[in-house]
Amino acid sequence: MSDTVPVITIDGPSGSGKGTIAASIAGQLGFHLLDSGALYRLVGIAAVAGGISLDDETALAQLAESLDIEFNPAKTPDRTLDILLASRDVSDELRLETSGMYASRVAAKPAVRQALLRRQRAMRKKPGLVADGRDMGTVVFPDAQAKIFLTASAEERAERRYKQLINKGESVNLRALLAEIKARDERDSQRSVAPLKQAEGALLIDSTSMTIKDVEAAILAHICAMGISV
């Protein structure tokens, strides 16, 4: 049964590094990877492309139910997954700031979250799953064997994102990034359904002054303590 398959959840705010860490941990364990944020971004991208208002909850939920999505192993080292929407590679488009804003808006819609819940739980397959998002440990996989809440200061998260975008050759304003991150934090933590919060029993890691290797080591130690073989 699927509920016997081990799940590791990594939740946290935008820019906390949970996507990078989740992909690394999944790779080291040989587990499947669920990037839940990508699902909400996909709904937002498809809605805008199809002329659907991001405030039309019913239409967005119907769209979420019917989306043709593929998650494939990445062909290049700069990605964790190759993500296709209706057979079109949208992996790079998903990482745009506009896509993140779409995701934050559609994720606040209860009907959309319900529509995507089944898709997320269906990804729990052997040998195991690493799931990152904002409600993985609280709502989607409350019975997960190991739960992590990864965070960092808003300033540090904005700086990381700024450097990432600059390295890609994009023009970006650090102050605007910081304002958007703070706005997203407020939307995600204050929404009425599945708000961003630390799951009961989750290991809290503040990565503000930590390296990626430090974070990985702390998570792997916690996973071992929870009885999952590393």
Image (cartoon, rainbow, N blue to C red):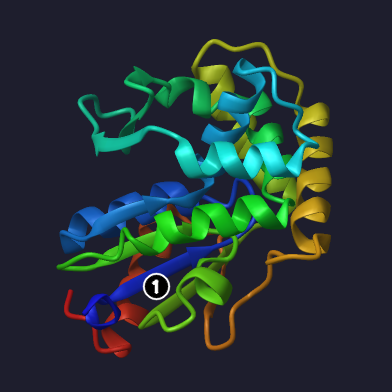
List x then y, in percent, for residue 106.
69, 42
Secondary structure beneath label 1: helix
Q: Which residue is drawn at 29% across and 65% down?
A: 124
- Is residue 73 visible from the viewing direction of this image? yes
* Residue 228, above or below 13: below
Residue 182, percent from left and from top: 81, 47
**Residue at left offset 61%, top offset 56%:** 113
- Residue bearing the label numbered 1: 218
Where's the C terminus, which quadrant?
A: bottom left
Q: Quadrant of the N terminus?
A: bottom left
The residue type indicated by label 1 comes to: Ala
Drawn side of residue 86 relative to residue 173, left or right: left
Apparent side of residue 21 relative to residue 177 in the rendered image (left or right):
left
209 to 6, vertically: above or below: above
Relative to 218, is 175 above or below? above
> How many badges with numbers are in the image?
1
Please identify the quarter of the rendering in which residue 217 is found.
Answer: bottom left
How many residues crowd mark 1 within 10 Å: few (<14), some (14–19), many (20+)?
few
Q: Position of residue 218 (x, y in %)?
A: 39, 73
Q: In this view, does 155 lie to the left or right of 97?
A: right
Q: Residue at x 74, y 43 (%)?
A: 57
Q: Is residue 208 visible?
A: no
